[in-house]
Amino acid sequence: MDNYEALVHSAFGGQKPDTSDPEVLAWLIRRNGLEMSHISHGSHIGSVFSAAEIIAVLYTGVLNVDPSDPKKPDRDRMILSKGHAGSAVYAALAETGFFPVEQLKTHYGNGSILSGHVSHKGIPGVEVSTGSLGHGLGIGTGMALGAKMDGAAWRTWVVLGDGECDEGSVWEAALQAAQFGLDRLCAIVDYNHMQSLFRVEETLRLEPFEQKWKDFGWNAESVDGHDVVALRAACDRAKANAGSGKPSVILAHTVKGKGVSFMENDILWHYRTPQGEEYEAALKELEAHRP
Amino acid sequence: MRDAFVRALLEEMEADSRIMLVTGDLGFGVLKPMWERFPDRIIDAGIAEQGMVSMAAGLAATGRIVFVYSIGNFPTLRPLEQIRNDCAYPGANVKIVCVGGGFVYGSLGMSHHATEDIAALRALPGVTCFTPGDPAEAEAVTHRAVRTEGTCYLRLGRGNEPKIHPGPVEGWEMPAPLTLRKGTDTALLSAGGILTQAVEAAKLLEEKGISAEVVSFPCVKPMDEGAVRKLTERFRHIVTVEEHNIIGGFGSAVCEIAAETGNGCRIHRIGLQDCYTSVVGNQQYLREIYGMDAKAIAEKTEAWLNEA
């Protein structure tokens, strides 16, 4: 493919998409996610689509990050703990200028630096590599604790999956973050209600989920995870919780596969990659709803 | 070794404010001097080892040198994947400290016997593995760990072990082994607190007219390949001694090097013979039961030397 960027931006008719608009960035995450999965035959497109608004809102003003200085000391740290949605973060980083959009076409490929699960090696803007579930909140707890010990103002953000919350290590970190009063730590759960085989409710029930976090000593609230305005407001409230002595969690209610009707709420799309007519149909649906 | 470690680390903490310690709710009494001196640089992570190690990786990412302290298998096998993915892969400055390598917690039972830790940690790329043999070596490797970039593993023994080196191990260069006794007939290579038994075994062998060299390996990864090669050139038989499964541990590490020399030196591995401990007893009793006390080392060595 000669010009990947032109292809994924073609719906904007030659205009440069405004990636400071969370709806535009969320759309670009899905558009890139579709293309990357199509090219690479890589899986987890359903998770990329459910997390699109969460990631887009973070990279359009919530996170204090700078693509021209990705290692600046006072940057916010963002950890994608559900590493299998890596292409959502890769797309957001590329579209907001951390590295060339063109590079996204190498995702999953031999010799690429963009592995299926998110990797920090050689990729500006990625703090830690994940993929095995249940690691991110612990690492984020350590980062937030280090910042607190330094009296630093930067925040730590961790995006978790709901299925990931089966892992005991998530709850170890939940206890630890609350114990240490890490009120500049914020977790966002992509609560798409689907795991690898069945629905969350059919696997290991998390409800009453919000209450669980509260009982663990966290500020917790639930929002529509596809409503960028509601998500942004929740992130702002989480920021305002600094001083509360408690970490914050946002339960973002989402739909797995959101944005393409035949992918929505279908576990098949945890694994399947869009090819042939399915790719064409998905593309048509996305383009029909471009912001 | 435990107290030598705490002493050495306290010295380092005085000099370098980046150093801190995270404990998995263990170290009653032992860590008291640290709580008193540096209350802001010691953290109890609770009985939550996975979270503890991930947290240590996160703390290291903020520019700290983080020692993680626990006993037996709790800081190693329990959070092994956190050590692999969160610490070793990014090269985080996390130093995993295990008190109780081998049968230290003898009568507490097999859950508390650390007998596969060297094998597991040694297999992780980028993890430096220290296995000090006495308090002086424990002190030396603690200082060394602070100065070794990336993830390290310190496999300590217990408190109040006998001193084998007469004084501090001055000028030790990692990963060089330390020769405690020269010999001409065979060499007993030891890693960890079982060193006392190797030293005693050499004395028993001497009574039988066998001259055994005793060499301690305070660092098993990286291994001093040159030193091992030289030993294989000097001796027809080498005996490795470890309070650890013979699969994957120190003896295996020696074999890996010796096999490549092709000079025909035979390596005999003394250690736990690929089993779990199910006998109740203290450390020395278990060494006797599982054939790695001084007497067993001496008898086996004599028999091997008589084979060829």
Image (cartoon, coloured by chain):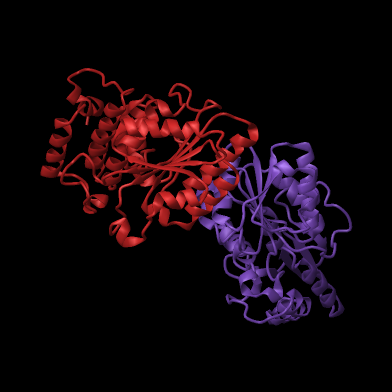
- Chain coloured red in this rendering: A
The answer to which of B102 and B36 lies nearer the viewer is: B36
Does the rendering let one see residue B50?
A: yes
Question: Residue A234's x, y, as percent?
Answer: 40, 34
Question: Residue B196's x, y, as percent?
Answer: 80, 68
Question: Residue B133's x, y, as percent?
Answer: 76, 61
The answer to which of B195 and A290 lies nearer the viewer is: A290
The vertical placement of B138 against A237, above or below, is below
Question: Residue B282's x, y, as percent?
Answer: 74, 76
The vertical placement of A223 against B110, above or below, is above
Q: Give the quadrant of residue B237.
A: bottom right
Q: Residue at x 29, y 21 (%)?
A: A18
Which quadrant holds the N terminus of chain A?
top left
Does the rendering let one see residue B306?
A: no
The answer to which of B184 and A9 lies nearer the viewer is: A9
Q: Residue at x 40, y 25 (%)?
A: A61
The vertical placement of A63 against B301, above or below, is above
- In the rendered picture of this protein, how many numbered marks are placed on residues? 0
- A17 to the left or right of A146: left
- Chain coloured purple in this rendering: B
| Farthest-out residue, left | A277
| Farthest-out residue, top | A15
- B218 to the left or right of A122: right
Q: Residue at x 30, y 37 (%)?
A: A52
| Farthest-out residue, right | B166
- B89 to the left or right of A114: right
Which quadrant holds the C terminus of chain A?
top left
Q: Give the quadrant of residue A30.
A: top left
